[in-house]
Amino acid sequence: TKDVGEGTGLGLSIVHAIIRDHGGTITVASDGPGNGAAFTFVLPLVEQQA
C-alpha cells in the first residue's frame, strides 16, 4: 500500500488480467463509501497430472 497519489494505479488491473487468463473471476462488494470493500477471487481447480 502506498500513499494516495504515489502508486501507478495498475495493481487491480494487472491482477484482473492474471485471474482472467487463468479462467477465474473477481467480484467486489461494498456497503458504500467509507465502509471498505470485499474482493472475491475465484480460480478453477486443476487436476494434478501423474
Image (cartoon, grey):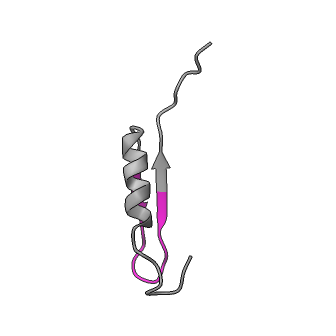
- Residue depicted at x 47% and y 34%: 44
Question: Residue 14 location in percent, x, y?
Answer: 41, 58
Of 41 and 1, which appears nearest the observer? 1
Furthest residue in direction bottom, as rendered? 4
Q: Which quadrant would the N terminus be assigned to in this image?
A: bottom right
Question: Residue 49 location in percent, x, y?
Answer: 58, 16
- Residue depicted at x 48% and y 78%: 35
Q: Is residue 25 above or below residue 9?
A: above
Q: Is residue 1 above or below residue 10?
A: below
Of 7 and 40, which appears nearest the observer? 7
- Residue depicted at x 37% and y 51%: 17
Q: Is residue 36 above or below residue 20?
A: below
- Residue depicted at x 46% and y 78%: 7
Q: Is residue 18 visible?
A: yes
Q: Is-magenta flag for residue 19?
A: no
Q: Is residue 25 visible?
A: no
Of 2 and 24, which appears nearest the observer? 2
Q: Is-magenta flag for residue 35?
A: yes
Which stretch is magenta?
26-39
Q: How many marks?
A: 0
Furthest residue in direction top, as rendered? 50
Q: Which quadrant would the C terminus be assigned to in this image?
A: top right
Image-quadrant location for residue 21? top left
Question: Residue 48 location in percent, x, y?
Answer: 59, 21
